[in-house]
Amino acid sequence: MTFFKLRHKETGLFSVGGIRNQFTKKGKTWSQIGHVKCHLSAVKKGAEWYRGDLGETCQKYLDSIELVEYTLGDPAERVIPF
């Protein structure tokens, strides 16, 4: 079984989803890469549409994360470019 998380590059914490910069030790887990891509697409649109603080927050979020793939039973992780 494969699952996905969005990790903050500097802190190693995981995104809780949404368009705000919120990260925790556990974060949100996505079971399908398509769901992660939908999330990232929504945040990207937010960065383009919103002006001011929210638009900047969306862009900072996108710039600060990396997509990580995990496979159950395999201690290795794989960073996927997006």
Image (tube, rainbow, N blue to C red):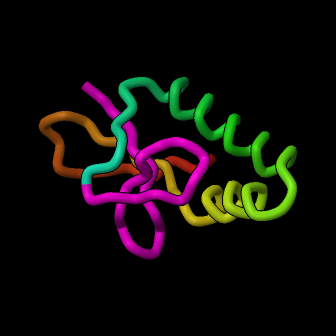
At a point 17% along the width and 50% down the height, the residue shown is 75
Quarter containing the N terminus: top left
What stretch of residues is rendered in magenta?
Answer: 1-25
Q: Position of residue 53 (x, y in %)?
A: 75, 63
| Residue 22 belongs to the span the image colors magenta | yes
Does 34 sit above or below residue 42? above
At a point 38% along the width and 50% down the height, the residue shown is 78
Q: Residue furthest left?
A: 73
**Apparent side of residue 65 relative to residue 72 in the rendered image (left or right):** right
Q: Position of residue 43 (x, y in %)?
A: 68, 43
**Apparent side of residue 36 relative to residue 59 in the rendered image (left or right):** left
Front residue of 57 and 11? 57
Q: Residue furthest bottom?
A: 10
Front residue of 17 and 40? 17
**Apparent side of residue 43 relative to residue 34 in the rendered image (left or right):** right
Front residue of 22 and 4? 22
Q: Position of residue 46 (x, y in %)?
A: 76, 44
Dividing the picture into quadrants, the one containing residue 23 is bottom left
Q: Give the number of callouts.
A: 0
Does 56 sit above or below residue 43? below
Q: Position of residue 5 (x, y in %)?
A: 39, 44
At a point 47% along the width and 68% down the height, the residue shown is 9
At a point 30% along the width and 41% down the height, the residue shown is 70
| Residue 32 belongs to the span the image colors magenta | no
